[in-house]
Image: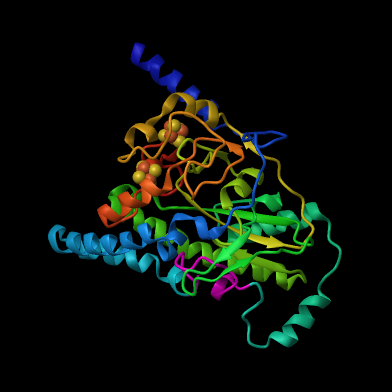
Amino acid sequence: MVKYFSLVLFLSKLGKLLKAKIVEKPKYAVVGPLKRFNQKHTVLSRTSWDPSFQRLKSKYQKTREERIRKENVIEDYALRDSSWYVANTLGTFAGFMHGNKGLYSWKSLEVSKENLDSEMKSRKKIRKPATVSEKIKSAGKFYGADLVGIARLNEFWVYSYSYNRSTEQNRPIRLPQRYEFAVVMAIEMEYDTFAMSDIGASAATGLGYSKMAFVSSLLAQFIRNIGYEALPCGNDTALSIPLAIDAGLGELGRNGLLITPDFGSRVRLCKVITNLPLKEDKPSSFGVQEYCEKCKKCLESCPVQAIREDKTAEAITTSNNSGVLKWPVNGEKCFRFWCETGIDCSVCIKVCPYSTKRKSG
Ligand code: SF4
Ligand code: SF4
């Protein structure tokens, strides 16, 4: 009997936890001056120019080869590497996440471009923002997004500079004011492969990255085909997590990631920035911040103590942004661990109670 009531209590708590309600303001507190972040300072960009991180790249490669030799995981790595194929080639990689190239091009790649451009412009007409927003969301889901929300583009979330890891050029980003909205999309990372092992999690991550390039480029093309401009983006151009929070897709967790009601942090994010007038969504809340205060599972499970006990609005490393009160994750420690294990780590996503199996399977 006691067990039965505990179960009922647990389920009712879970139900309350997952019931997202619309709120007027996102549940992050801006407590200091916001600065646009330079993409050159992300940990992955630093592997191209920061000597302490450059050295780590060869460590990563060496450990990976050792694991393939000793652990009989060649097929696992094959599954993982192939998942990244679209992202690493047509999606300009995660690798050189500078944007405006390949599937992330800011203009259509179709060959008969001139005719298309004038044909598309002729389709431009005033549309009701609420109606077209619903169509945009349906199209995003049709192309493969699991969640779609719309945010008014906060200029502070746009990178100050775009860093190209192949050429090492660092160019200022100045988006014209007409780009007022971002359509933000979350793509679920497949549960079973994600849960399988660290290499499996990386395969599910890579597939998420490949889908990001596919889905955002198709949605951008849809917007162009109704006469407006659209910039498909992966991790480039603007910070995806605050945009996703503004678009009502979820809340920020202690693990430094977006937590969605449906998939927890088991999602990848992409966005399309556009001049199409849209109806923005309101942020949502389902108690994540309060739950994280007590839970701490990610903090306790992180193998390198990269997740913090307390919140701060200060930049704790070169790769953190300041101004928002949050639990900042130490990306330097995190990346070093990836290089020691020869694979990216997803422990803080796996252990999170919100990242449970909800849709796949
Ligand atoms: S990815 Fe792994 S190492 Fe990095 S913060 Fe999460 S648990 Fe820690
Ligand atoms: S594991 Fe717990 S503390 Fe960490 S993000 Fe998830 S809910 Fe929050």
48 w.r.t. 314: above or below: below
Rendered location of residue 345, percent (x, y): 34, 49
Q: Residue at x 82, y 71 (%)?
A: 124
User: Is the magenta region chiefly helix, strand or loop?
Assistant: loop
Residue 160 is one of the magenta-drawn residues: no
Residue 95 magenta-highlighted: yes
- Residue 311 x, y percent position in the rendering: 51, 31
Q: Quadrant of the N terminus?
A: top left
- Which residue is the extreme one toward the top? 2
The residue range painted magenta reads: 90-105
Q: Position of residue 34 (x, y in %)?
A: 66, 44
Q: How many marks?
A: 0
Could you say which is closer to the camera, residue 9 or residue 50?
Answer: 50
Q: Quadrant of residue 324?
A: top right
Q: Is 343 on the left-hand or right-hand side of 244?
A: left
94 relative to 321, above or below: below
Location of residue 182 with respect to 223 vertically, above or below = above
Between residue 139 and residue 167, name the one nearer to us. Answer: 167
Quarter of the rendering containing residue 339: bottom left
Q: Residue furthest left?
A: 70
Determine the residue located farthest toward the right in the rendered image: 126
Q: Is residue 228 above or below residue 52?
A: below
Residue 327 spot, x, y in % from top left = 50, 35
**Residue at position x 39%, y 16% from top?**
6
Specify the quarter for ligand 1: top left
Of 331 and 13, nearer the camera is 331
